[in-house]
């Protein structure tokens, strides 16, 4: 077994899973699944035994009379997957669908920092990305990730995929079962800082902002639940993490939710304790970012933007400073038309919030982050008055 973890060829072979490089096919009936006569092409058996398994191109170790690996171009002459490999169960359970990527067994012998090693790592890295993209089963993905599927780091370093990096792939492709598995089994390491190949800013993990950017509401909900189990300092670091100042402008996940107008993501972040008062690199709060979206012409998606603004009203302190306030005062008629008179007067401080908004603020604050948003159903309000109908557990 490699020092990086995972099962080597000898361990798999000992378990009877497949004939690895150190366990060639046995002679006689055992290799053929019984005592029947050998009907395979005998002249090439010695040559087949001496070859290591490649990346499932059909040229690796195969049994006579059985389908070859991958494309079926080996001596077996078949087109299906090799039955001696543990991942052949994918096709037995789900014969219809995308073909799983070839397992990069050639990476097992990666050594040094040459161009060939880097090429092998790129091949194995894409194989894992492709498997997550195709929404293959969780057990298959974890086998790939832990069985020496490498990627190439800057500086000529070969690294395993960490749970944090695997979670980023699951976020991008909305593989909810895999994200749930990673967050349940590895809550700390799944939300740890990924390598520099995955994140330009090493301040903290970018998973929350990534979930908001791709609008993965259910995965975001599970990340927030996992964050609630962290110590208070680590929890705040994840919830209020600022993005890279050069690429992301120092925006938090709340800024991203306001910029992209994601009301469900916005309410989940606010209800789990994300701060609505933090400025980004340009000094704008999430409220400023949302007002800038409302001011864009032509007006699009106005209803969703006003819904985000109403969610912010429930959590933002009344006297919070924001840079757009002077623009609201200078262009009163325009902003009154955009926001409505009651929202406008409340924002600029000309009137207190309505009785409904004040009552909702009190009710929302009675819900602890551990019970949000499930406790919204228990609020003593008619259904149509509740902020959002978030059914995330089903």
Image: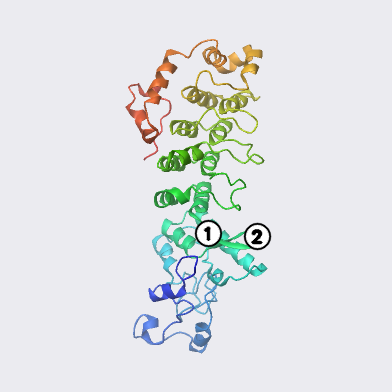
- In front of the other: 151 or 380: 151
Q: How is the protein colored in the picture? A: rainbow
Answer with left or right where residue 41 lies relative to residue 110. Answer: left
Dot 1 or dot 2: first in sequence order is 1
Task: Residue 233 in the image: state x and y as whole percent.
Answer: 47, 39
* Quadrant of res 339: top right
* Quadrant of res 221: top left
Q: Estimate the spatial distance between the alpha carbons at disc 1 and disc 2, rounded to whole Å.
A: 21 Å
* Marker disc for residue 308: none
> Can you identify the residue that label 2 sits on?
155
In the rendered image, the vertical position of residue 39 relative to residue 18, given as above or below: below
Q: Residue at x 60, y 67 (%)?
A: 120
Answer with left or right where residue 251 lies relative to residue 352. Answer: right
> Can you identify the residue that label 1 sits on?
128
Task: Residue 270 in the image: state x and y as whole percent.
Answer: 47, 31
Q: Residue at x 62, y 70 (%)?
A: 112
Secondary structure beneath label 2: loop
Q: Residue at x 64, y 63 (%)?
A: 156
* Quadrant of res 209: top right
Task: Residue 5 in the image: state x and y as whole percent.
Answer: 47, 65
Tags 1 and 2 touching, CB below 8 Å: no
Neighbourhood count class around disc 2 (C-alpha, 10 Å): few under 14, some 14–19, many 20 upward = few
């Amino acid at each position: 077994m490699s020092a990086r973890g995972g099962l080597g060829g000898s361990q798999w072979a000992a378990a009877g899973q497949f004939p690895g490089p150190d366990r060639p096919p046995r002679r006689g009936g055992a290799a053929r699944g019984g005592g029947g006569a050998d009907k395979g092409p005998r002249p090439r058996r010695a040559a087949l035994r001496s070859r290591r398994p490649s990346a499932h191109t059909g040229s690796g170790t195969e049994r006579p009379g059985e389908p070859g690996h991958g494309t079926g171009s080996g001596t077996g002459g078949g087109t299906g997957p090799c039955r001696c490999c543990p991942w052949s169960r994918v096709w037995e359970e789900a014969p219809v669908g995308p073909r799983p990527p070839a397992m990069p067994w050639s990476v097992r012998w990666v050594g040094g920092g040459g161009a060939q090693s880097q090429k092998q790592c790129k091949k194995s890295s894409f194989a894992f990305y492709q498997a997550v993209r195709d929404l293959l089963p969780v057990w298959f993905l974890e086998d790939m990730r832990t069985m020496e599927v490498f990627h190439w780091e800057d500086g000529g370093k070969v690294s395993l995929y960490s749970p944090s990096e695997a979670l980023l792939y699951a976020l991008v492709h909305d593989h909810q079962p895999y994200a749930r598995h990673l967050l349940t089994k590895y809550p700390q390491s799944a939300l740890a800082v990924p390598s520099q190949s995955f994140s330009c800013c090493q301040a903290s993990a970018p998973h929350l902002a990534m979930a908001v950017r791709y609008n993965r509401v259910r995965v975001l909900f599970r990340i927030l639940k996992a964050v609630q189990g962290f110590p208070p300092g680590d929890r705040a670091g994840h919830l209020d993490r600022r993005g890279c100042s050069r690429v992301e402008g120092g925006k938090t996940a709340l800024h991203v939710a306001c910029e992209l107008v994601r009301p469900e993501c916005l309410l989940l972040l606010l209800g789990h304790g994300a701060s609505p008062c933090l400025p980004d690199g340009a000094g704008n709060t999430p409220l400023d970012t949302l007002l800038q979206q409302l001011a864009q012409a032509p007006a699009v998606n106005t209803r969703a933007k006003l819904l985000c603004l109403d969610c912010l009203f429930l959590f933002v302190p009344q006297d919070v400073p924001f840079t757009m306030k002077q623009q609201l005062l200078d262009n009163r008629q325009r902003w009154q038309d955009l926001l409505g008179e009651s929202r406008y007067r409340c924002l600029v401080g000309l009137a207190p919030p309505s009785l409904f908004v004040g009552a909702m603020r009190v009710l929302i604050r009675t819900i602890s982050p551990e019970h949000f948003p499930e406790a919204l159903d228990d609020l003593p309000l008619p259904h149509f008055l509740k902020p959002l109908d978030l059914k995330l557990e089903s």
